[in-house]
Amino acid sequence: MSDAPQETSQSTEAELIAVRREKLAKLRELGVDPFGSAFETTHTPAELRANFEEEKQVKVAGRITGLRNMGKSCFFHIGDVLGQIQGFIAVKKLSDEQKAVFDCLDRGDWIGIEGETFITRTGEPTVKVEHFTVLSKSLRPMPDKWHGVADRELKYRKRHLDLMSNEESAAVFVARSQMVAAMRDFFHGRGYLEVETPMLQSVAGGAAARPFETHHNALGMPLTLRIAPELFLKRLLVGGFTKVFELNRNFRNEGISRRHNPEFTMLEAYQAFADFEIMAELVEELTCHLAEKFCGGLKIEHKNEEGNVVRTIDLSRPWKRASYHDLVKEVAGDDFFDLTPEQRRAKCDELGVQISEEMEDYEVIQQVFEKKVEEHTFDPCFVTRVPSELIPLAKVTPGGKTVEVYELIINGQEISPGYSELNDPDVQRERLEHQAGGEEEQLVDYDFIETLEHGMPPAGGIGIGIDRLIMMLTGAPTIRDVVLFPLLKKKE
């Protein structure tokens, strides 16, 4: 064999890196480019395994994830996030130069292989390698083969290590990509047009949230990152788009938790001549379609770290519909809305719901709803007849105290709101100015009000929190497990 240095299980990380750098130098001495070039393939590792046929010439490339060198022969696996395939090399048939190159390979390196397919005596689909090509030398070792990346913070800070060593984590992100593609197909198939609206906005509208602020130097004007695309999508309704959707990134300069990341993915869709009931049916149909296609059915199991099922979410249709007031009364008492605001605050102490002095009465009620209803609702529930103070962009129901909306709760959190959209410009102006509380110039988009004066058709609208939806469908315990690169506090 060659004189290439070898790694041992007792080596420190610094020693392992030193060994790999020696191998890097050895490859260059042998006239091999350690960082390769283009390599034409016939299959991905996953494709080859899924459609395996014996005695077929193939060319496959991937990262070496396992390597068993037994002297005269070697079995190894190469793969990517979609899957892997086994390779076999008869080392004794390699030339001296090829042996020297092969001895410079480690777990983590990328290679291309060419050869004929066969099945081993143990039934493993395998490629008998006739030629191999070094594509990229890994200078740092992969995480431990058996334990992967166990430290949760390391998983989020160094997602590449998590993906290369944790098949379950990689599968979540592959599923996310496929689900998002399926959502696009779902809306395209129903005649919706996909659009893109500005992420830099002069007025942060469409939701009540604190924006990230920035400044455009050339124009000399302050801007914010969008908190929602809603007002621009409604401009398109005015312009004549009757079915429109956007998959978008939103930014809110607020807290971080297992359910919140400062930048997140939303799908917003608007349909002219529809209402919130029509949009509720749409989101119910979409969610069940995704569950059946990617989760094997409408029962979604959520497991703990030990692999034990802690909850099963049942998406079977039809989904429950209940009014906001009725749900709050179930947890706070039938007389809750007959109490004075001061008595409701005292009731919060009894219920163990934390409130602040600054909260208005409707915010106190909403706090009870979030802590005692929302966080304990796991199977789907459309919450309807929501107080008008909470949602200034939806039509008011007859009587004026609630709005024509649903809030879809699944897995203890809001997944999707849906509205019968407010299209009266005068009422919209009044609502937004009231919400602004004296800061109309900064918080009210008067250009949007002017746009509404040109006539927006009656419409239904929905927002879907993609990250939360993926959490529910995959059983992920935190939003950080479904966002590839979540925002984390900088390490000191």
Image (tube, grey):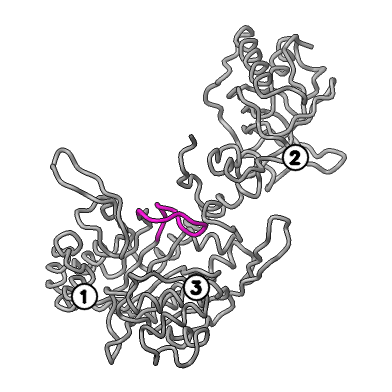
Q: Could you tell me which secondary element the residue under label 1 belongs to? A: helix
Q: Residue at x 69, y 24 (%)?
A: 106
Q: Which residue is mark 1?
A: 431
Instruction: Give the mark count.
Output: 3
Provide the residue span drawn in magenta: 253-266
Which mark, residue 114? Answer: none
Task: Name the kind of residue labelled 3 in the image.
Answer: Lys
Q: Could you tell me which secondary element the residue under label 3 belongs to? A: helix
| Of pointers 3 and 2, the one earlier in the residue sequence | 2
Task: Name the kind of residue labelled 1 in the image.
Answer: Arg
Q: Nearer the viewer, residue 278 or 52?
A: 278
Which residue is situated farthest in the right direction here?
121
Q: Residues within 10 Å of mark 3 (few under 14, many from 20)?
A: some
Q: Is residue 426 visible?
A: yes
Question: Is residue 263 within the magenta segment?
Answer: yes
Residue 399: which quarter of the image? bottom left
Q: CA distance from mark 1 to mark 3?
A: 27 Å
Q: Which residue is mark 3?
A: 371
